[in-house]
Amino acid sequence: MYRTHTCGELRIADNNKEVTLAGWVQTVRKFGAITFVDLRDRYGITQLLFGEKLNKVLEENPLGREFVLQATGKVNERSNKNANIPTGDIEINVSSFTILNKSAVPPFTIQDDTDGGDDLRMKYRFLDLRRNAVKKNLELRYAVNRAARNYLHSNGFMDIETPFLIKSTPEGARDFVVPSRMNPGQFYALPQSPQTFKQLLMVSGYDRYYQVVKCFRDEDLRADRQPEFTQIDCEMAFVEQEDILNMFEGMIKSIFKEVKGIDYTEKVERMTWEDAMWNYGNDKPDIRFSMKVLNLKKPASVYVNKADQSSLINGADFKVFDEAETVLAIAVPGCSEYSRKQTDELTEWVKRPQVGMKGLVFIKCLPAGQAGNADGTYKSSVDKFYSEERLKAIADAAGGKAGDLILILAGVEERTRKAISDLRMEMANRLGLRNDNEYKLLWVLDFPLFEYDEEGNRWVARHHPFTSPKPSDIETMISNDPVIHNAAEYLKHPYANIKANAYDMVLNGNEIGGGSIRIYQRELQEKMFAALGMDKEEQLHKFGFLLGAFEYGAPPHGGIAYGFDRLCAILGGSESIRDFIAFPKNNSGRDVMLDAPATIDEKQLRELQIKTDVTGD
Ligand code: ASP
């Protein structure tokens, strides 16, 4: 037996017990004739005391950091207790020990505050994984995994594996492909998600499916993306949107409870996509704080049901507003005292290429008493164009109160809407309104079914091609020709306003899950493919299996998938999903530990009948 206890287990109640521990040497401290060693394993750290006799043996066999050690001895109460660790009341008075294995000097210290930089730690990820900080993240990941499985299992869901070597499943990214040796010139694709398989499982009658599953998407990577990532992937048959929302609200609440001890009892808020974009400039708004967007113009767009508020800014001869497609404002609480320097800095912030605005207009809602005013007053960078009364009207409409700072952006629709959302988040960060320990869930509903692709002058699926339109929009979809004859007026095409039976779950401004009610009739699915520009032949080539299956009694069904890595990162209070993956890739999609991707042998290439031309000429 290598050990009787773990290094995190022994307490004062174990005093005088004879024990054997095994683990890694964290530190060695020599005090004259005695030596203290901190021994570490996954469960904790225990102090070992080597007395005079063993010290001699140690001199001949010196211990180094990360040596693997087995030590036997008696548990003793420590004279010098360490209140910071659970085993801090005791130590082991070692009577014998064995060095199970030596270690080279590790390239960084295996401690909470390590001296290793990112790259070094990724190269030696197996050592980094020994550190507490990383271990805690993996423990949290496992807890989330367990909680999700427990919930789904107790609700009758069945975990069914689906293949990785498949034919393309379009989810909006490039496929990773795998050459087939047995079928030269042919390739498998790795699944972007198990989407079509889970739908086929519904046709097969497994009406509640789930899988914690790897998905592969060849995308340009941002800090929070990985080429392979994990989803909690689910599908249900005989359900409507409402059933799915309730079931998965339940799952996330159960995860909150089991993993974080949080009772999320309130109903999850719901918002249409149109409201989210209109009021927050974003389809995944953080609703832990308000700072809603005021639309001072109504752009030619899909926001058909929204009010035109342009009278608030019209007729002042202020060209920037008059000529802009979109003018948007937010009221930032308590910032009316911003100095010239601070407003200049904010202006620079919105002018950065990532935000891309030409400038920033502000109105200060100065409270009574400030700057010597009896009743409060409004000061603005556009005083020349707007009377104080008009400034007040704008500020009021934006929800600005005395002491607030109104920030206004003007420009083209898409960019300005994104910019106001970025600015809103930035101000919330600066004001500390985005607290990691506060969780706020939101369902965003009624997304547009199609997005317009300017380059190809055609429609693309906003979610994926298997998403059903809202029942009330099916007729519009069937009875209209998808072709866009007039690109400049694509917004007038009936397809622009078709809504999808789709939903996203948003947590603190992050999309953590998304799904839809699916199309389950062959004709509608064919219509959908045709709308996306696929002719009959291509439809059959790519999706003949699915269209065929729909002819054999496909039940109404729908589902959702959660981004498991992201969910863990948010629950762990981190920005980066990489911290929650045991062996992640870096920003260029490389595994620096394995040094992958890598070239393969000539022989392998020959077997696959593949010629490479890495120079690209
Ligand atoms: N397969 C979809 C995705 O990966 C999720 C779904 O529609 O269930 O986003």
Image (cartoon, helix red, strand yellow):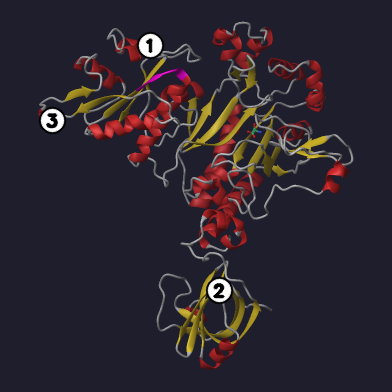
Q: Identify whether 484 is placed above or below 7.
A: above
Which residue has dot 1 on it?
Answer: 323
**Quadrant in which the N terminus appears:** bottom right
Q: Which quadrant of the view contains residue 330?
A: top left
Q: Residues within 10 Å of mark 1 (few under 14, many from 20)?
A: few
Q: Residue at x 10, y 29 (%)?
A: 372
Q: From mark 1 to mark 3, how far is it between C-alphas?
A: 34 Å
Region of the chain picked out in magenta, as a range: 409-413
Would residue 415 appear left or right of 148 to someone viewing this image?
Answer: left
Q: N-terminal of the two: label 3 or label 2?
A: 2
- In the picture of the structure, the residue carrying the numbered disc 3 is 371
Which of the two residues, 579 or 402, is positioned nearer the viewer here? 579
Element at label 2: loop
Between residue 12 and residue 352, name the one nearer to us: 352
Residue at position x 32%, y 39% from top?
431
Residue 557 spot, x, y in % from top left: 69, 29
Q: For the residue with label 1, is its CB less than 8 Å from the closest atom of ligand 1?
A: no
